[in-house]
């Protein structure tokens, strides 16, 4: 959490090569909230300001877009709340989303852009003329048009289609667009840079008539220019500071308004800061105008006092250790700087600085929310679909069922597991026992269905290669509502290697996925089918494996019989085998031992049983994850000895399983070195709440 100014912030949205930084009142409490948008993934991270100027950062939220090229903030959906609009040129789409609560994601409103091709820049601001409403409208610049590539369009906000009102001529590509109030009591104006072969031009447009009229321009700026603005001289008008990242100079030009109400740029002044400038952010500390300037390779910065007349004066130099500065913003009595790891892709940390009589002292600091996938936005809709589809609610009605994935010919079998109580863990006398299997303790389990076999490549590749799965929908009956929800779940990126490693796919278990990938498959399948699926807990897995038995194996204590029930090191021929070929356990489950070791939900803790035993009888235990490693896996694999395939045998995952992962950074989807790991599904009789579903499908500990 970090503090932030409660006073009105600078209205600029700051843009860097990889991110947008903006602010607004998203929850309507009168305090300024902040947002950081990752361009590549389209995800945004929100910091909600609490009383006392402290920020509550929440998990990243998706927009449904990737390669975001434009971003703006305004009252787009509700007059009293700020919302956000995103543009993606290659997707030819706009997305509008609100964020009224730290606990619930707004649902993105996707707007197919038909007024042009390639919306690259978007600004939210009021547009006058017939049909004007209290809501902000949109200016959109697009880049793939013909005969002229660049086109500006004005759009009325109807909260649905955003119909086009008018076109605005653009002589080049629009960038760094904002809505600004240049003088107190005056309407918002559109400000943007227009890039061309002759350099950049800064222009200010008045959209009050509903058609758009340019009120001031400033040409001759270097190509690739950027800017900040403020009332540095303390007067009623605004001044703009222009610069080109990598150059040494700042170029000041005031915006002046004459007696007749016309705007024009006044005479300018150039200031040389003596080193390459990467970014300039205007700060406003108790009325004193200051600048936060990032230099060089972004590993150092300086705070400057600036009165709009004399050259900026250095107040304090600041160094980033093993980090790079990305942006900054004002705080009451200081400022906050955002940083990323050197060579990183996005901001991952913040550092606040408190003002003192002699300069600034480092204060609050911390990590920003991860950009790991969480699919928060899809969970409520998936939950509603599941609730509407649930038919069986009583234990007596639970039957074996064969489920076909809609839009495909792929099916899988789920078997009912009755409720009951069992003794979890192994006795000290059990051969091959390890200390993490004790002490034994009683556990109660609620009813559920479990996959008769491990998830196969036939099933998993539908999720792994979504384009292939979509092609089958035209030939096989499908469910369009489920398809739409399933498509919105984050899918894995295409792997760099052939993931079966030559061991076979048709009828063979899927392997080498992380626990995160297995969880996302469960979410995808739940959306697709309207039935809730997840990984089993350790307790559920062992309960189902034992099937009412108390011996080392469900068939007894003699490991010599294991070959009848499992593929393991002595009979596997050094690879996994097709599922369901060995004898089942008493409840009909195949390959509970061997073939592939199976993911469960729990964080692996060698002492977890001690905690459970101390509580006496426990119901549905689940050791929720708080860190990326280790997670529990159960059942042993084709590469394990017999002792590792016992009902009570436990094991934890290890970062070393990713040693040969060719992706940099390491993928949260695959393990290249874990060719023995897979998973199977459970479907509990009792449908969990939406919040519980989210926790099952996203642990919150995913890392690259």
Image (spheres, helix red, strand yellow):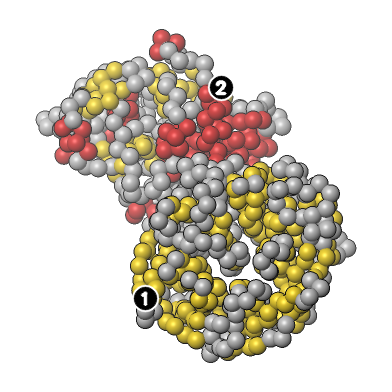
Measured as percent of width and height from the top left, residue 63 is found at 60, 48
Q: Work out which residue is located at the far left of the displayed protein and give it.
A: 429
Question: Looking at the image, which is closer to me, 475 or 349?
Answer: 349
**Number of numbered discs on residues:** 2
Residue 538, visible in the rendered structure: yes
Q: Which mark is residue 660?
A: none
* Quadrant housing the N terminus: bottom left
Q: Is residue 228 left or right of residue 114?
A: left
Secondary structure of the residue carrying numbered label 2: helix
Q: Are marks 2 and 1 in contact (CB under 8 Å)?
A: no
Rendered view: 473 above or below 44:
above
- Res 647 → quadrant: top left
Q: CA distance from mark 2 to mark 1?
A: 59 Å
Residue 411, visible in the rendered structure: no
Which residue is found at the position 15% from the left and 32% from the top? 614
Residue linked to disc 1: 356
Q: Work out which residue is located at the far top of the displayed protein and give it.
A: 396
Measured as percent of width and height from the top left, residue 203 is found at 75, 72
Secondary structure of the residue carrying numbered label 1: loop
Question: Looking at the image, which is closer to me, 56 or 144?
Answer: 56
* Quadrant housing the C terminus: bottom left
Which residue is found at the position 83% from the left and 65% from the top? 213
Query: Which-is-in-front pick, marks 2 and 1?
Result: 1
Which residue is found at the position 48% from the left and 22% from the top? 413
Measured as percent of width and height from the top left, residue 149 is found at 82, 64
Label 2 vs 1, first from the N-terminus: 1
């Amino acid at each position: 959490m970090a503090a932030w100014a409660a006073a009105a912030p600078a209205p600029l949205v700051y843009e860097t090569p990889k991110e947008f930084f903006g602010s607004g009142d998203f929850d309507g409490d009168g305090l300024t909230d902040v947002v950081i948008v990752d361009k590549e993934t389209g995800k945004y991270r929100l910091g909600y300001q609490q009383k006392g100027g402290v920020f509550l950062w929440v998990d990243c939220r998706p927009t449904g877009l990737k390669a975001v090229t434009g971003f703006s903030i305004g009252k787009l959906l509700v007059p009293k709340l700020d919302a956000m609009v995103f543009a993606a040129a290659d997707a030819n789409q706009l997305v509008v989303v609100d964020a009224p609560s730290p606990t619930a994601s707004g649902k993105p409103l996707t707007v197919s852009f038909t007024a042009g091709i390639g919306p690259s820049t978007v600004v939210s601001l009021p547009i006058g003329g017939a049909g004007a409403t209290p809501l902000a409208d949109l200016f959109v610049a697009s880049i793939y048009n013909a005969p002229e590539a660049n086109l500006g369009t004005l759009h009325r906000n109807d909260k649905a289609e955003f119909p086009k009102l008018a076109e605005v001529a653009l002589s080049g590509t629009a960038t760094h667009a904002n809505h600004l109030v240049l003088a107190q009591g005056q309407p918002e104006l559109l400000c943007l840079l227009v890039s061309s072969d002759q350099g950049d031009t800064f222009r200010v447009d008045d959209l009050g008539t509903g058609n758009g009229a340019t009120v001031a321009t400033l040409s001759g700026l270097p190509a690739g220019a950027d800017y900040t603005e403020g009332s540095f001289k303390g007067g009623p008008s605004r001044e703009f500071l222009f610069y080109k990242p990598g150059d040494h100079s700042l170029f000041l030009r005031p915006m002046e308004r004459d007696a007749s109400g016309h705007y024009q740029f006044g005479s300018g002044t150039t200031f040389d800061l003596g080193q390459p400038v990467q970014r300039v952010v205007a700060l406003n500390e108790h009325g004193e105008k200051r600048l936060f300037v990032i230099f060089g390779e972004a590993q150092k910065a300086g705070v400057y006092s600036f009165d709009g007349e004399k050259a900026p004066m250095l107040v304090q130099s600041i160094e980033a250790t093993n980090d790079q500065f990305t942006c900054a913003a004002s705080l009451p009595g200081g400022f906050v700087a955002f940083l990323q790891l050197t060579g990183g892709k996005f901001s991952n940390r913040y550092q606040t600085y408190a003002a003192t009589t002699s300069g600034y002292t480092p204060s609050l600091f911390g990590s920003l929310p991860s950009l790991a996938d969480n699919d928060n936005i899809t969970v409520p809709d998936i939950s509603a679909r599941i609730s509407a589809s649930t038919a069986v609610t009583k234990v007596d009605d639970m039957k074996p069922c064969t489920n076909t994935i809609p839009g495909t010919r792929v099916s899988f079998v789920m078997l009912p597991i009755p409720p009951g109580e069992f003794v979890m863990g192994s006795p000290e006398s059990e051969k091959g026992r390890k200390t993490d299997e004790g002490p034994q303790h009683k556990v109660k389990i609620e009813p559920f269905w479990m996959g008769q076999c491990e998830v196969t490549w036939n099933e998993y590749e539908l999720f792994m290669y979504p384009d292939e799965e979509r092609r089958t929908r035209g030939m096989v009956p499908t469910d369009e509502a489920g398809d739409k929800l399933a498509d919105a779940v984050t899918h894995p990126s295409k792997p760099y290697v052939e993931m079966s490693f030559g061991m076979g796919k048709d009828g063979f278990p899927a392997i080498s996925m992380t626990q995160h990938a297995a969880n996302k498959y469960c979410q995808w399948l739940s959306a697709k089918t309207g039935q809730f699926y997840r990984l089993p807990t350790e307790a559920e897995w062992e309960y189902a494996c034992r099937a009412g038995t108390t011996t080392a194996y469900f068939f007894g204590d003699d490991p010599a019989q294991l070959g009848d029930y499992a593929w393991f090191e002595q009979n596997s021929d050094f690879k996994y085998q097709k599922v369901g070929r060995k004898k089942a356990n008493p409840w009909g489950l195949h390959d509970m031992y061997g073939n592939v070791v199976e993911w469960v939900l729990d964080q692996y803790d060698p002492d977890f049983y001690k905690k459970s035993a101390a509580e006496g009888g426990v119901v549905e235990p689940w050791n929720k994850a708080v860190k990326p490693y280790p997670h529990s896996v159960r059942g042993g694999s084709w590469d394990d000895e017999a002792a590792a395939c016992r009902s009570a045998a436990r094991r934890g995952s290890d970062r070393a399983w990713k040693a040969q992962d060719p992706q940099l950074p390491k993928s949260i989807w695959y393990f290249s070195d874990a060719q023995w790991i897979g998973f199977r599904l459970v479907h509990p009789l009792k449908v969990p709440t939406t919040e519980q579903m989210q926790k099952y499908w996203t642990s919150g500990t995913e890392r690259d």
